[in-house]
Image (spheres, rainbow, N blue to C red):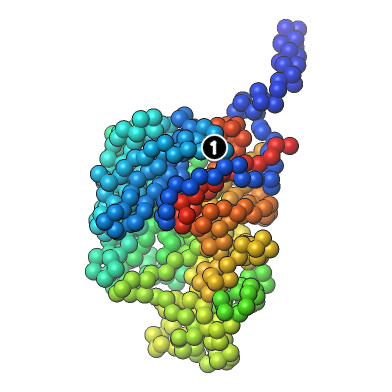
């Protein structure tokens, strides 16, 4: 009888609460509409390169933003901007953390439990970089850890026990110094002890990997040096890591406990000559005109995020594409400047017109199997899409085909001047729970927009809306309602070309 009375009182109390009281309880699901995101705040923190990546600390309501200006110049600014985020509609820059004492540019930041981790490259980009950990409260240094060359992305494992970096290891412009690409695993509870691993354990699989589309190319074609880790995501149980190897067109899988690479998944190629994959390959055809073409795309993902369901990890990738272009080596040529095999391309003269394929940038490292300078296949950079992959075996579950292009054209954010290169350039991706839905946010660097998708069914993502943002969005950060200062979920988009941070929130139903 007492239990029944107590339950009744609890129910009466719950339904007599105000809406604001309900949403402060992290166990209560806030009924938000994921198709209704709208901008509520904006802040300009600087010039070109000023707002690449952001990280949020719910304990202090601070937003930490990468700010690199005038890189490689005497008056360069390399620091982490600190923003008061207690009221996202009225953000204020309150100070900064200089990274000059630790090296060169800061490439990435991440926050967990009062700790801010920053990935900082060396002044000589080919030398080993650092991860520096600061307190989010007073910005004092906790630890300084040496990692691999050019740490490009840093993240915490969900349990906070590890900090991980993708160390890209880019070559010098003369290609005389090409460090190995590596992954650093830092144990927070073991006095920040670090283990940096390269891909030497996978050398024996090189031939098999390349047969599936894994790219090893450039001067010397060195397996270890050619691998360039780009972006990391970690499983919910903090045991497994997936890393995009962008230039190599693959995803690596790593076991944290043993600190070993357990697999590499080559991603293959996308056929632009099939229904749904139509693209516009020219910036000289008078506007967007999608069609089928005898051409393949190389996925080459940048950002990656994981969503797990029923024991299966689903990997979401933003298929940006990226070419190697250095003084000593460049893989890029336009189709009009190469020789097409007349058997493979009987209409070669027509294809090489500027309004057709002539303006398209392709790689010279594929399509000419016998090295005679005559191309019997064409491969362009990126796939103008986002994809979903099975994290256990690397198989493709879904690709957005040409939908990102189509949605940007409809919203008048498509830039036809990029049609000959990588189109909208999907670069950033993050996933969060909005109400009862799992939602993916895809940042597109050349469309200055973020696409919002319902990914509750990972096999069939559904487009919800397109958000216009700053110039060249790099970072897309989701803040859940329970961690948000407004007690509503937030999307923070930071853009590198204009230094603008924008904040969006959905309506409640």
The image quadrant of residue 404 is bottom right
Vertical arrangement, residue 281 with respect to residue 165, above or below: below
From the viewer's perspective, tell me whether residue 276 is left or right of residue 205. right
* Label 1: few (<14), some (14–19) or many (≥20) C-alpha neighbours in 10 Å: few
Which residue is pictured at 39% across the width and 89% down the height?
Answer: 372
Front residue of this view, candidates 413 and 178? 413
Q: Which residue is mark 1?
A: 90
Where does residue 373 sit, x and y in percent of width and height?
A: 41, 87
**Residue at 30 percent of width and 65 percent of height:** 171
Q: Quadrant of residue 345?
A: bottom right
Residue 31 lies, in percent from the top left, at 70, 35
Answer with left or right where residue 475 lies relative to residue 171.
right
Q: Position of residue 346 (x, y in %)?
A: 57, 92
Which residue is located at x 53 percent, y 70 percent? 418
Q: Is residue 480 above or below residue 78?
A: above
Q: Residue at x 50, y 90 (%)?
A: 341
Looking at the rendered image, the quarter that the C terminus falls into is top right
């Amino acid at each position: 009888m007492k239990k029944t009375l107590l339950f009744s009182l609890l129910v009466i109390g719950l339904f007599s609460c105000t809406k604001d009281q309900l949403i402060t309880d992290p166990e209560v699901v806030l009924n938000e509409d994921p198709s209704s995101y709208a901008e509520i705040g904006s802040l300009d923190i600087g010039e070109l390169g000023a707002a690449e990546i952001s990280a949020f600390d719910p304990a202090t309501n601070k937003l930490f933003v990468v700010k690199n200006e005038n890189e490689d110049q005497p008056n360069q600014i390399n620091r982490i901007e600190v923003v008061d985020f207690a009221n996202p509609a009225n953000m204020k820059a309150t100070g900064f953390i200089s990274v000059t004492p630790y090296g060169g540019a800061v490439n990435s930041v991440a926050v967990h439990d009062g700790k801010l981790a920053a990935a900082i490259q060396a002044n000589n980009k080919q030398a080993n970089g650092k991860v520096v950990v600061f307190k989010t409260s007073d910005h004092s240094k906790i630890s300084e850890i040496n990692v691999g060359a050019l740490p490009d992305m840093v993240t915490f494992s969900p349990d906070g026990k590890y900090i991980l970096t993708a160390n890209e290891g880019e070559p010098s412009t003369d290609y005389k110094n090409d460090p190995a690409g590596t992954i650093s695993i830092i144990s927070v509870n073991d006095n920040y002890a670090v283990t940096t691993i390269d891909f030497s354990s996978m050398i024996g699989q090189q031939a098999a990997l390349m047969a599936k589309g894994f790219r090893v190319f450039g001067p010397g074609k060195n397996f270890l040096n050619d691998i360039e880790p780009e972006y990391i995501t970690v499983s919910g149980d903090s045991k497994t890591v997936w890393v995009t190897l962008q230039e190599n067109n693959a995803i690596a899988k790593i076991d944290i406990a043993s600190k070993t690479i357990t697999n590499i998944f080559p991603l293959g190629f996308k056929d632009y000559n099939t229904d749904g994959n139509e693209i516009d390959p020219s910036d000289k055809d008078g506007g967007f005109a999608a069609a089928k073409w005898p051409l393949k795309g190389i996925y080459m993902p940048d950002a990656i995020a994981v969503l797990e369901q029923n024991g299966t990890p689903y990997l979401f990738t933003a298929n940006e594409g990226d070419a190697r272009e250095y003084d000593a080596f460049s893989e890029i040529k336009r189709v009009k400047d190469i020789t097409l095999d007349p058997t493979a391309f009987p209409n070669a003269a027509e294809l090489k017109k500027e309004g057709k394929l002539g303006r398209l940038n392709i790689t010279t490292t594929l399509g000419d199997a016998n090295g005679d300078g005559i191309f019997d296949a064409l491969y362009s950079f990126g796939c103008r899409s986002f994809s979903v992959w099975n994290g256990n075996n690397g198989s493709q579950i879904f690709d957005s085909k040409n939908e990102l292009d189509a949605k940007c054209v409809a919203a008048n954010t498509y830039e036809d001047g990029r049609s000959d290169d990588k189109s909208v350039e999907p670069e950033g991706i993050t996933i969060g729970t909005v109400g009862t839905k799992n939602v993916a946010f895809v940042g597109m660097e050349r469309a200055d927009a973020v696409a919002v998708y319902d990914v509750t069914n990972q096999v069939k993502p559904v487009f919800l809306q397109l958000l216009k943002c700053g110039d060249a969005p790099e970072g897309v950060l989701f803040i859940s309602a329970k961690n948000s200062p407004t007690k509503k979920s937030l999307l923070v988009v930071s853009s590198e070309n204009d230094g603008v941070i924008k904040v969006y929130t959905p309506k409640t139903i």
